[in-house]
Amino acid sequence: NGRFQITPFAAGEIVPGLEVLDAVQQGTVECGHTASYYYVGKNPALAFGTSVPFGLTAPQQNAWLYHGGGLELLQELYADFGVINFPAGNTSAQMGGWFKKQINSVADLKGLKMRIPGLGGKVMERLGVNVQVLPGGEIFLALDRGAIDAAEWVGPYDDEKLGLYKAAKFYYYPGWWEPGPTLEVQVNKKAWDKLPKEYQEIFKDAARYANINMGAQYDALNGAALERLIKAGTKLTPYSQDILQAAEKASFDLFEEDASKDAKFKKVYEQWKGFRKQIYKWHGTNELSFANFAFSRN
């Protein structure tokens, strides 16, 4: 009925794409749509709001956020910035990035310049990668012109739109650093508190709808996009066990180190780790056995 309106602006129109949290915190805008892992420099535990290496799939992430205590833990973190957050999008399973050359072992990663944010970037640094953090609009040119050697973005549908297959031909999987990444809407807490309760509930419902609907859209679109990319000459390539095992070890070494240094990180991590263990066991018992049988027959 027009009583409650939100005017969207693209990244760069008011603030750069990687400064959304700052703008919301300072009141430059009342709210912003972004990924929490861009702000691990402020608090590494914020990464859990999006996705962390070898973490939760999209359904598991939603289960943790909505019914496993995850959102409450994250909102405690954001309270330090005068911000409240809500899940508002998920890209579903992501891919493992575009590379100009084949990567067969950890040794092949050393010295590579790669666009990858969040804790995944910190893990890649431990594996010898020269990590770059770039907003989406800058990735193609950087990769095409050789400023970077590799880049991860999202998955087949978005990567195709960005034209990344024109700049690099080796497309790796799985996206172990973002198995189920959530986007979120961050709201200035003072602005939030001024909203009538009715509008707060409408806002939360809209965010929840965006979260569920976006994931469904990506799942519907990615299959056909992957087929088009392969027809265009993309080389679909799995990460080696050598790389996956090294990345997993480096990931949990990083988590444990951050937990030992930061009580807030430890609080989120320990609770998340317990939830992950339980849901992995459940999905590993039921969903994995079904997928191994059914997917292999398609």
Image (cartoon, helix red, strand yellow):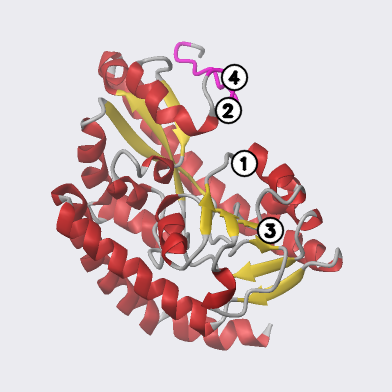
- Tell me the magenta residue range: 3-14
Q: Which residue is mark 3?
A: 156
Q: Can you tell which quarter of the image residue 100 is in?
A: bottom right
What amino acid is labelled 2 in the image?
Ala
Report whether residue 202 is seen: no
- Report x, y in % for residue 18: 49, 34
- Report x, y in % for residue 172: 64, 69
Density class for disc 2 (Cα within 10 Å; few <14, some 14-19, many ≥20) is: some
Q: Is residue 211 above or below residue 232?
A: above
Taking the spot 71% from the left edge, 69% from the top edge, the residue there is: 101
Taking the spot 46% from the left edge, 53% from the top edge, the residue there is: 181
What amino acid is labelled 4 in the image?
Glu
| Most common SS among magenta residues | loop
Residue 13, label in figure: 4
Whether 85 is among the magenta residues is no
Q: Is residue 196 above or below residue 38?
A: above
Direction left: furthest residue: 263
Q: Which residue is mark 2?
A: 11
Report whether residue 182 is seen: yes
Residue closest to the eye, 154 or 199:
154
**Left or right of 99 on screen, residue 134:** left
Residue 136, label in figure: 1
Q: Tell me the CA gap for discs 4 and 2.
A: 6 Å
Taking the spot 23% from the left edge, 65% from the top edge, the residue there is: 256
Which comes sooner in the sequence, label 1 or label 4? 4
Asked which secondary structure carries label 4, the reply is: loop
**Left or right of 252 on screen, residue 241:** right
